[in-house]
């Protein structure tokens, strides 16, 4: 009995197949390609007011099942001539049951190498909007239930958002369009944006439900991407969500359970992890609703990891004035020095215009450890727009002094303007401090800085009326200009530092500065007094991460109306009674009119090419070296002859200056030995005196 039922079932299926193939065969024989092409072109024009061009010959094929192959196709914009879409081949998959009824119903479309132009004008109108809105008249011949793309390209130009990008190598397939139930969706390819710069390969998987009555829904959506963002930042990302979009007369977009997970590296190679959870995002006509969101990011490797945490409360309102009453952003890092920044703000968002107005902004920054720990609390306001970037204005107090910051971020990077009455940067760093500072400076984003400060203290530096401008272009930091009052005079400087190459350059000039005040601040003791003018041009390279060494360059010094402490040049050759800073009698001193020196700097040592001193008692000249790292001195001064013939000049006493700039040591090296030798030549041989403390020596 069972075998008989199976035979009947097989026979019925064969009969149905013969009937189906025979019916379709009759339909193929009766098919008129030219007539169908005319109907298809006219239908597209009637329904969408677009021009469809099919320059090739249409062919109806039984295999693949019931396929109408059109060859090349081109579809225009609504103006009838501007290209919107084109493909090297288009295949229309037909409904076989409709063929049996001598009707041609398109069940699916497949494109080979399609090219699509998506554009939005400044008013926010897309050039494909008319294709998404359900038309008033229904056309059964274009009930498309499946769409397939192979090797596609999509060009995106969004004037309203300033986006310019492209999708290339796109392969995709969507089934079940216009039918009940959920059907598979697949899309993969590569996306690139020229502005802002980004390149990503993507793979989208999910389930699709789409029809003209309820719109487009995606569930179990998983988007994987491998992207290059913001230069060299590299991210591997997974995005999960549920999405519904109704493009009808009252558009509605709903995103649920959005989860973003990403990991990769920043543009400078530091590890990066991102996490964002948004339970609900809804946009309906002209209103929007956002549920509470949470995001986290980890930047850098331990122990220098920067932790970023984002918290947002629910917000809703018109899409051109969406109110976000509370957003909190917190940044923290524990090494190499603890730092923290907490921001809390309320904002109004204009979604169509892409702008944000920050009405209330509170900031709290902390850094360092006791006893040099610092903190800054401020409040302010700000704004954001796609064309002008982010602008924040903050006013607060740091160390008892008002500090005002004006921050702007746009395509060129950060621009910071700071104004304060007093800025204390603490002690000058040691060798390890220089390493930490260089590492911190390398992490700074590209940008520029303008600083105005009533006073600035950094180690021995004491500057007032400071105006500085600097910028960082990610390859080197440049001090464009520095002007300040220092040591009773005027300081001007500029320079640059290439942190990756560990080299730097500095040019500075000091005018009318007090040498005594300068030396007191730098070395703790002033062995030289007067009013000075200094010019210097230095370049150096760091050695093993320590304080900059190996300086090369040049420097010049001119001191007027000064005093040389610790030595009286009018008593040449006499023993120096008191070294500078010693207890007892007041050290000797030499007033002078001018002191001029110029030096060549190499390998951290300044070699004096010129050293001249004009004093009321006479003129002196000399030379020597100064070790720039230890400020060790090896100098000599000799009196300049006063017009006496060379063969009549007596050898003069020479002053040797050693020690350091804070404690110079003076020693006389006289020409007495040479003078005695000249006398002996004129008077004949003499018996030398015995050394002090030795017995008299008698000649044999």
Image (cartoon, rainbow, N blue to C red):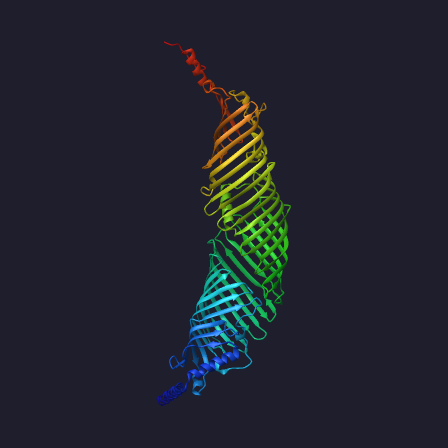
Quarter holding residue 214: bottom right
**Rendered location of residue 329, percent (x, y):** 58, 57
Q: Quadrant of the C terminus?
A: top left
Relative to 1, residue 607 above or below: above
**Rendered location of residue 260, percent (x, y):** 51, 63
Relative to 546, residue 516 above or below: above
In this rendered view, identify the residue nearer to me: 310 or 157.
157
In this rendered view, identify the residue nearer to me: 326 or 394.
394
Identified at 43% across, 16% down, the residue is 677
Identified at 50% across, 49% down, the residue is 442
Q: Quadrant of the N terminus?
A: bottom left
**Rendered location of residue 618, percent (x, y):** 54, 23
**Rendered location of residue 117, percent (x, y):** 49, 69
Q: Tally the numbered discs.
A: 0
In this rendered view, identify the residue nearer to me: 625 or 684.
684
Relative to 496, residue 72 above or below: below
Q: Is residue 25 visible?
A: yes
Q: Is residue 635 visible?
A: no
Relative to 219, residue 470 above or below: above
In this rendered view, identify the residue nearer to me: 175 or 536.
536
């Amino acid at each position: 009995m069972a075998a008989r039922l199976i035979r009947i079932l097989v026979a019925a299926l064969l009969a149905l197949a013969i009937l189906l193939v025979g019916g379709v065969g009759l339909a193929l024989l009766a098919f008129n390609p030219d007539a169908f092409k005319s109907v298809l072109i006219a239908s597209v024009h009637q329904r969408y007011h677009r021009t469809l061009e099919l320059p090739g010959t249409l062919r109806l094929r039984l295999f693949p099942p019931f396929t109408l192959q059109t060859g090349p196709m081109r579809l225009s914009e609504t103006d009838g001539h501007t290209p919107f879409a084109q493909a090297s081949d288009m295949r229309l998959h037909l409904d076989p049951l409709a063929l049996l009824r001598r009707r041609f119903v398109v069940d699916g479309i497949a494109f080979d190498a399609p090219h699509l132009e998506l554009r939005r004008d400044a008013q926010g109108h897309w050039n494909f909007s008319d294709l998404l809105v359900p038309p008033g008249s229904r056309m059964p011949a274009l009930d498309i239930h499946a769409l397939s793309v192979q090797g596609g390209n999509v060009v995106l130009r969004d004037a309203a958002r300033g986006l310019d990008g492209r999708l290339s190598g796109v392969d995709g397939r969507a089934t079940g369009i216009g039918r009940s139930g959920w059907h598979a969706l697949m899309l993969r390819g590569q996306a690139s944006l020229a502005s802002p710069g980004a390149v990503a390969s993507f793979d989208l998987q999910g389930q699709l439900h789409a029809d003209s009555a309820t719109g487009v829904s995606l569930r179990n959506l998983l988007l994987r991407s491998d992207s290059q963002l913001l230069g060299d930042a590299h991210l591997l990302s997974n995005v999960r969500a549920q999405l519904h979009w109704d493009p009808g007369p009252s558009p509605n977009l709903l995103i649920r359970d959005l989860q973003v997970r990403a990991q990769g590296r920043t543009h400078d190679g530091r590890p990066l992890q991102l996490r964002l959870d948004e339970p609900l995002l809804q946009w309906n006509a002209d209103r929007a609703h956002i549920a509470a969101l949470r995001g986290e990011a980890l930047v850098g490797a331990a122990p220098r990891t920067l932790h970023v945490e984002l918290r947002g409360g629910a917000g809703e309102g018109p899409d051109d004035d969406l109110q976000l009453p509370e957003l909190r952003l917190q940044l923290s890092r524990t090494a190499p020095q603890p730092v923290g920044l907490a921001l809390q703000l309320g904002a109004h968002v204009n979604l169509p215009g892409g702008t944000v107005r920050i009405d209330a902004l509170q900031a709290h920054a902390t850094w360092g450890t006791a006893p040099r720990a610092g903190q800054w609390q401020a409040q302010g306001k700000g704004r954001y727009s796609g064309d002008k970037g982010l602008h924040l204005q903050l006013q607060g107090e740091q160390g008892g002094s008002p500090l005002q910051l004006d921050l702007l971020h746009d395509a060129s990077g950060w621009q910071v303007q700071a104004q304060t009455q007093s800025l204390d940067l603490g002690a000058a760093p040691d060798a390890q401090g220089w390493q930490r500072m260089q590492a911190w400076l390398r992490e700074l984003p590209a940008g520029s800085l303008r600083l105005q400060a009533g006073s600035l203290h950094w180690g021995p530096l004491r500057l007032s009326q400071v105006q500085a401008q600097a910028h960082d272009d990610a390859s080197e930091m440049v001090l464009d200009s520095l002007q300040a009052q220092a040591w009773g005079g005027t300081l001007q400087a500029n320079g640059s530092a290439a942190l990756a190459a560990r080299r730097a350059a500095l040019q500075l000039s000091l005018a009318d500065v007090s040498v005594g005040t300068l030396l007191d601040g730098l070395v703790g003791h002033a062995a030289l007094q007067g009013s000075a003018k200094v010019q210097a041009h230095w370049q150096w390279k760091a050695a093993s991460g320590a304080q900059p060494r190996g300086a090369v360059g040049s420097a010049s010094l001119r001191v007027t109306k000064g005093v040389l402490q610790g030595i009286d040049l009018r008593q040449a050759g006499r023993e120096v009674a008191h070294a500078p800073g010693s207890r007892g009698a007041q050290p000797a001193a030499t007033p002078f009119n001018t002191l001029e020196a110029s030096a060549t700097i190499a390998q951290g040592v300044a070699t004096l090419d010129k050293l001249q001193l004009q004093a009321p008692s006479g003129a002196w000249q000399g030379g020597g070296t100064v070790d720039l790292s230890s400020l060790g001195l090896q100098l000599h001064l000799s009196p300049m002859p006063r017009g006496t013939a060379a063969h009549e000049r007596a050898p003069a006493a020479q002053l040797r200056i050693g020690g350091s700039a804070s404690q110079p040591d003076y020693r006389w090296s006289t020409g007495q030995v040479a003078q005695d030798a000249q006398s002996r030549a004129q008077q004949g041989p003499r018996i030398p005196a015995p050394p002090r403390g030795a017995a008299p020596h008698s000649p044999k």
